[in-house]
Amino acid sequence: SQTIHQWPATLVQPVGSPLSLECTVEGTSNPNLYWYRQAAGRGLQLLFYSVGIGQISSEVPQNLSASRPQDRQFILSSKKLLLSDSGFYLCAWRQGGGYTFGSGTRLTVV
Amino acid sequence: GQQLNQSPQSMFIQEGEDVSMNCTSSSIFNTWLWYKQDPGEGPVLLIALYKAGELTSNGRLTAQFGITRKDSFLNISASIPSDVGIYFCAGITQGGSEKLVFGKGTKLTVNP
């Protein structure tokens, strides 16, 4: 079956620390993958998308980066977190007629 | 960039009432999607619309893809307490790299 996994579910990190969030999909090949951020429970902002291994497109300038080392793996990273990086991060993939989202990672930068 | 204007921002209704929310855009979209998000979880797809003028139902939910391809509405009939959540419209862009663009959401509260 086709599923999407995202972890961790919650994360509390100090300012200036690095970040690595991972997203993997199962049951498909060469999916389009996306990272979104949601602040204050409203509105999803597209951060990055990838149409294949090593192919990353950034939507907004920010303190984050993304990588796609394998076909079904999408990673969101930061070298030094800022307070403003706090939020709910969601991974998604194009599946059939719509997009399917992971369960999200709640990141709190303190 | 492309933006979706979703309204209303929030709604407070009594159980049993019908609900209507809508999205408009200055851009044309190939596909309109409606999602519901519960607290602390990812959005879940409710209805997908693929053709201009298309009217689709999913249980008590009905959504339509506007003729101009620049708008869509979602109706919920006979609301129940579990309808509480945030509803998002989203459009899939046409041409070039495909992207899913979201409205800002409608927060629905249903009073028993």
Image: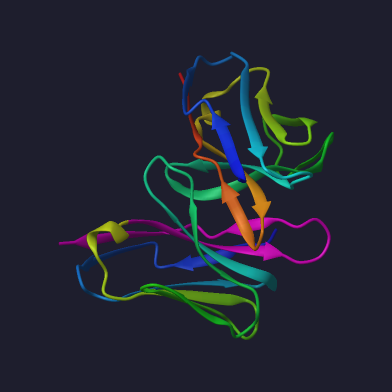
The answer, for residue A64, to whether it is visible in the render is: no
**Outermost residue to the front:** A1
Q: Main secondary structure of the magenta part?
A: strand
Quadrant of the image occupied by residue A25: top right
Give the magenta-colored segment's residue range. Answer: B85-112
Q: Is residue B96 magenta?
A: yes
Q: Quadrant of the N terminus of chain B?
A: bottom right
Q: Position of residue B14 (x, y in %)?
A: 19, 68
Is B79 drawn above or below residue A31 in the view shown? below
Looking at the picture, tell me which residue is in the foreground, B10 or B83: B83
Colour theme: rainbow
Q: Is residue B37 magenta?
A: no
Is B74 drawn above or below residue B106 in the view shown? below
Q: Position of residue B10 (x, y in %)?
A: 34, 61
Q: Quadrant of the C terminus of chain B?
A: bottom left
Q: Residue at x 53, y 66 (%)?
A: B5
**Outermost residue to the left:** B112
Q: Residue at x 59, y 47 (%)?
A: A45
Q: Residue at x 73, y 36 (%)?
A: A72
Looking at the picture, tell me which residue is in the foreground, A41 or B54: B54
Q: Position of residue B23 (x, y in %)?
A: 52, 71
Q: Position of residue B75 (x, y in %)?
A: 40, 75
The answer, for residue B62, to whether it is visible in the render is: yes
